[in-house]
Amino acid sequence: MKNYTITVNGNVYDVVVEEGASGSAPAAAPKAAPKAAPKAAPAAAPKAAAGAGSIKVEAGAAGKVFKIEASVGQAVKKGDAVVIIEAMKMEIPVVAPQDGTVASIDCSVGDPCEAGACLATLN
């Protein structure tokens, strides 16, 4: 996964590009959002302490938490959706970076988030 900063008509966007699973050419994911998005810290989940795990699950784009797909204690595989955020009317899955167990969910539905914000942690 590579991060790029792109300027289009004076607007600056952070873009995350992921390599395809089959090793094919990299495909740009719909994860672009203006850097000028509102900044807010995600709220801690009531079931576990914020940041309880050692592996961070971070937002790839600025937006709003649309849906929480996993729960604390649930086993997830690399690439499984943990949280779904909404940005510019698109639903963008925030996936587990590796296999693990969800240690904390550090956001709630409706919370604003910025690119790179830690939304959950895994062990």
Image (cartoon, helix red, strand yellow):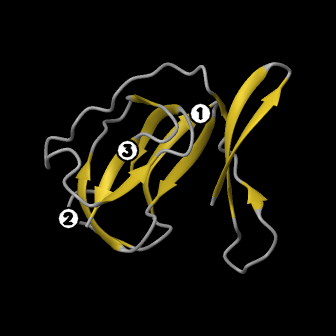
| Residue 51, percent from left and from top | 23, 49
Q: Which residue is drawn at 50% across and 19% down?
A: 38
In the image, what residue type sits under mark 3?
Answer: Cys
Q: Residues within 10 Å of mark 3 (few under 14, many from 20)?
A: many
**In this picture, residue 22 sits left or right of residue 66:** right
Estimate the spatial distance between the alpha carbons at disc 1 and disc 3, rounded to whole Å: 16 Å
Identify the residue at the far bottom of this view: 22
Estimate the spatial distance between the alpha carbons at disc 2 and disc 3, rounded to whole Å: 17 Å
**Which residue is tagged 3?**
118
Residue closest to the eye, 68 or 62:
62
Q: Which numbered disc, 2 or 3, marks the residue that appears first in the sequence?
A: 2
Q: Quadrant of residue 101?
A: bottom left
Estimate the spatial distance between the alpha carbons at disc 2 and disc 1, rounded to whole Å: 28 Å
| Residue 32, percent from left and from top | 68, 38
Q: Residue at x 52, y 37 (%)?
A: 115
Q: Residue 73 carries which label?
A: 2
**Which residue is tagged 1?**
87
Name the mark nearer the viewer: 1 or 3. Answer: 3
Whether 118 is drawn above or below 9: the answer is below
In the image, what residue type sits under mark 1?
Answer: Ala
**In this picture, residue 70 sits left or right of residue 27:** left
Please identify the quadrant where the N terminus is shown: bottom right
| Residue 83, percent from left and from top | 42, 49
Q: How many marks?
A: 3
Element at label 1: strand
In the image, what residue type sits under mark 2?
Answer: Gly
